[in-house]
């Protein structure tokens, strides 16, 4: 599978949609937690914490994917140039 710089807007959109989904999910589970008790509340709290941790990593994930695409374009250009 080849990538090009035109794929970067799609990656950015994917990261933004992922951030929105994680943010809304964390909000919903934190509101749900107040209505629960016991083990159920602990499970929901753990899920909320996990989503918050994923949300903190989204910029890093987006940067890594963008760099991978750019490096793929550069290496592809060098490989085709050598032929």
Image (cartoon, rainbow, N blue to C red):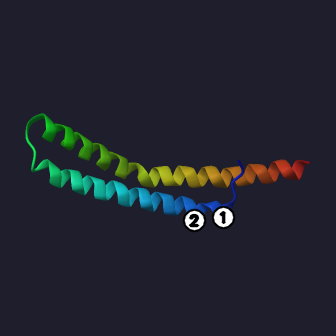
- The answer to whether 66 appears left or right of 45 in the picture is right
Q: Nearer the viewer, residue 28 or 56?
A: 28
- Secondary element at image label 1: helix
Spatial CA span between label 2 and label 1: 7 Å
| Residues marked 2 and 1 touching at CB (< 8 Å) | yes
Q: Which residue is mark 1?
A: 6
Is 68 situated left or right of 59 in this image? right
The label on residue 9 is: 2
For this rendering, which residue is in front, 32 or 78? 32
- Please provide percent x and percent y for residue 83: 91, 48
**Residue drawn at (57%, 65%), measured in percent from left and top?**
9
**Front residue (pair 18, 79):** 18
Q: Residue 22 occupies which quadrant of the picture? A: bottom left
Q: Is residue 73 above or below residue 37?
A: below
Residue at (31%, 47%) from the top-left corner? 51
Report whether 45 appears left or right of 7: left
Q: Residue at coordinates 29% horizontally, 59% vertically from top-left? A: 24
Mark number for residue 68? none
Q: Within 10 angstroms of label 2, few (less than 14), some, or many (20 or more) residues?
A: few
* Residue furthest out toward the top: 39
Q: Identify the residue at image location x=60%, y=61%.
A: 8
Percent position of residue 18, x then y: 42, 56
- Residue 42 spot, x, y in % from top left: 16, 38
Tell which of 48 and 61 is nearer to you: 48
């Amino acid at each position: 599978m080849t990538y090009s710089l035109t794929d970067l807007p799609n990656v950015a959109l994917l990261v933004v949609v992922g951030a929105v989904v994680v943010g809304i999910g964390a909000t919903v589970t934190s509101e749900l937690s107040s209505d629960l008790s016991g083990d159920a509340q602990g499970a929901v709290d753990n899920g909320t914490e996990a989503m918050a941790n994923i949300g903190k990593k989204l910029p890093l994930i987006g940067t890594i994917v963008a760099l991978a695409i750019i490096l793929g374009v550069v290496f592809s250009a060098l490989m085709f140039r050598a032929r």
